[in-house]
Amino acid sequence: MRFVKMHGLGNDFVVIDAVRQRVEMTPELARRLADRRRGIGCDQVLLVEPAADPRADFRYRIFNADGGEVEQCGNGARCLARFVVDEGLWQAPRLVVETRGGLVGLFLEPDGQVRVDMGPPRLEPAEIPIDAPARALRYPLEVEGERVEVGAVSMGNPHAVLEVADVAAAPVGRLGPALQRHPAFPAGVNVGFLQVLSPEAVRLRVYERGAGETEACGSGACAAVVWGRLAGRLGPRVRVHLRGGDLVIHWPGEGEPVWMTGPAERVFEGRIRT
Ligand SMILES: N[C@H](CCC[C@H](N)C(=O)O)C(=O)O
C-alpha cells in the first residue's frame, strides 16, 4: 500500500489514498502504521476516500495512534488539502471534505498556508459529550484527588480546556491522561492546557485522546480559542503558540464557524506491506 508521510506543525500523519487504492482500514492496521518502531510512525492515520455526501469532494477518515476512529483532525485537514492536489486527485485551490464530525472547507492559499473552515463549535453537554446537567463555562471535576475546573468544547471531537499560568510548568503528563479518561467524558477527551498572553495571543499544549501529547493540535487550538472567547479573555483573532509552531484562529462568535490557518508539510512517500 502506498502512503505519504506529512505533518502540520509536528503533528504527524500517515496519509493514504483510498480513492485509487482498495484499503481495508482496521484498528489493528492503524496501530501498526502508527507504531514508531514496528511501523511508519505517526500521531494519526488519515484516509482519503470518495465522498458519500453530495456536498463534499472527498470523505476524510481519521484514526488515532491507538487505532480508534475519530470525528475531526484540524492539522490533518490542512495536510489532506495539500495531499489531494499533490497527488493529482484534485485541481482547484478549494474543496469540501466530510468527516464524522461534519463538513470542513479547505482553501489552499497562494503563500502555501491552508485556511480551514472548521464549522461552528458545539457547546451543549450532550454534543461534546460531557456528563453535566447543563451548559457551563467551567465544569468542576475531581481528578487525581484534586478539584479542577475545565471548559468543554466540541469541534466535532471533544476537547477539555484547562487554563494554566504557565504551559511550560503545566502537569500535562499527569493531568492529561487522567482527564482524557475521566468518566465525565464518555467518549474520552482531548485535553488543552491554555495560557492566555493577551486578547490576541495564547500558548497551548494538548494531551490528545488516543495519541498523547502532540506537538500541535488544530481542533484543540480552535476549541481553546472558542473557550477563551466565551470566557471574555480573547478577541476574534488569536495567534496560538503551540510546541510545534503557530496557528491563527479566527472565531467571530457563537453560531459562527471557526477558521484556522496554518502550514501543511509533505515529508516522504513510501510503500508498506499490509
Ligand atoms: N486526537 C484527536 C484527533 C486528532 C486531532 C488533532 N491531531 C488535530 O489536529 O485536530 C481526537 O481523538 O479527537
Image: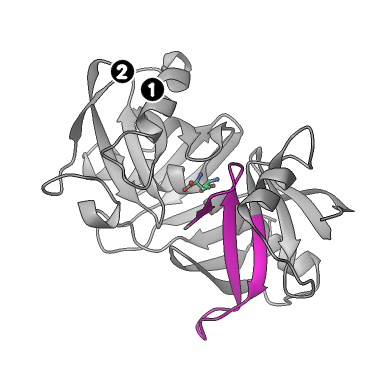
Distance from the alpha carbon under mark 2 to that under mark 1:
8 Å
Dot 2 crowding, Cα within 10 Å, few <14, some 14–19, many 20+:
few
* SS at mark 2 in the image: loop
Quadrant in which the C terminus appears? bottom right
Looking at the rendered structure, the kind of residue marked 1 is Leu
Cβ atoms at labels 2 and 1 below 8 Å apart: yes
Which residue lies at the image location 40% right of the left edge and 64% below the top edge? 119
Position in image of residue 37 (x %, y %)? 78, 32
Above or below — where is 176 with respect to 105?
above
Q: Which residue is mark 1?
A: 175
What is the magenta range?
46-70
Which residue lies at the image location 47% right of the left edge and 58% below the top edge? 71
Q: Is residue 31 magenta?
A: no
The quarter holding residue 178 reads top left
Which residue lies at the image location 59% right of the left edge and 52% below the top edge? 63
Quadrant in which the N terminus appears? bottom right
Q: Earlier in the sequence, mark 2 or mark 1?
A: 2
Q: Which residue is mark 2?
A: 144
